[in-house]
Image: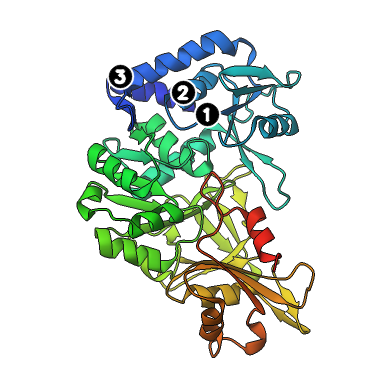
Amino acid sequence: MSATLRTSWQRTVRSAPAAIALRDAVTARSWTRAELTALGAEWAAEYGGELAGQRVVFSEPNGAEWFRVFLGLLAADAVIVPLDPGEPVTAKRAIAGNIGAMFLWHDHFLEPMGPPRRTHPHGPRLLKLTSGSTGVPQALPFTDAQLLADGRQVCTTMGIKRNDLNLGCIPFGHSYGLGNLVLPLLTQGTAIVCGVPLLPQALGEAIAQWRPTVFPAVPALLRALAGAEIAPVQLRSLRTVVSAGAPLAPDVAQAFHAKFGQTIHNFYGSSETGGITYDRSGRAALTGASVGRPMKGVKLRFGAKGRFWVKSRAVGGRGVFRPADRGELNSKGELVLLGRAGRMVKIAGRRLDPAEVERTLREMPGVQDVIVASHRDRADTLVAAVATRHTGEALREWLQGRIAGWKIPRKFVVVAEFPLTARGKVDSRRLQALLHGV
């Protein structure tokens, strides 16, 4: 019989039922593997009677309640749809309706949403939600086997062991959080400390107190830590610091390394594929040269104009997916991203890939992130939004002599940092409003 998320967790619990599985950094409350299992069983006994094979959207912040519902849904054999807790209830209802969910769990209440769906014995175990290019949430189905493969690839490639302690700042329900926090716990018992305040000083104090060894993070959080008044000794317990969700500026990696003596490991993936590449040494993050080599079990196949296909047991659907990014392998076998496909614009009758301008700007010390596009209302005018301390004039001077004059944006929108979603990713809608508001 093939392993499932439920049987994998049961095996993990049997191996050491009294081992700590989850700890709240604020209250110091901890839960053993057996205690988390009991919470899930209680939830399933109260709510799970008619959920087998049905889609259930649930929304909880990181913590024991998240696992109570998640493990309860596993016990009820439901199709799990985790959602960001920051969404308003009206948005949660709309999402649940759009994907045909039978129930929505929110505010400790299981709200009916629609009639039961026809179930399939080998259907998906979990649906990841991604907005894609339309802004409307799309449901990506994943089987137990695909989710377990993602967890194995993450643990094997990153060297995450059962006796490690994961720092749980990223949302459990996001693809990144599922692969790097939830699945390592379910499959091998890697414990999580969560509930950590995200203010840099408080985060530094929590790391010093609870001594996590693995920290899956986002660039904005790492940038805040590097710039805060935190004693390097407070982060001494960390062995592996991972950055994903958005591009990591080399100057952030350099500042973090200079201050804490820690290298940051770039991690590149997508909701559709799970992890794709990982910078095992951390050296690529210091220069921005690449996003690392393919993860163990992942194969890349390249086609025309840098488009590539990702193949692994963790990829949803038929096991092969082509991201919107373009890239190439360098001499070290590392993936170098070349921008998004289909972004060619025309400026004064000449074709330009905005990624060329973005790469040149990212090479400027002090530039955290950048996006370049043609103006929505003036198609032949190039505009750029840049997260940096530099002025627009300084950015223009940097580009002069490095790229042709006609490729230099006419307008620069300079911000301290890009707006982020609750998942730590760049909020594309708010960024586009900034970009086209010039």
Q: Check if mark 1's residue and mark 2's residue have beta carbons within 8 Å.
A: yes
Q: Which residue is mark 2?
A: 65
Quadrant position of residue 250: bottom left
Three-letter amino acid code of the residue under disc 3: Pro
Disc 3 crowd rating (10 Å Cα; few below 14, some 14-19, many 20+) is some
On the question of residue 335 being in view, the answer is yes
- Image position, residue 235 (x, y; %): 25, 49
CA–CA distance in space, label 1 to label 2: 7 Å
Q: Residue at x 55, y 33 (%)?
A: 85
Which dot, 3 or 1, sits closer to the camera? 1
- Image position, residue 389 (x, y; %): 47, 70
Secondary structure found at label 2: helix
Q: Residue at x 38, y 40 (%)?
A: 197
On the question of residue 283 being in view, the answer is no
Name the N-terminal-most of marks 2 and 3: 3
Name the N-terminal-most of marks 1 and 2: 1
Name the N-terminal-most of marks 3 and 1: 3
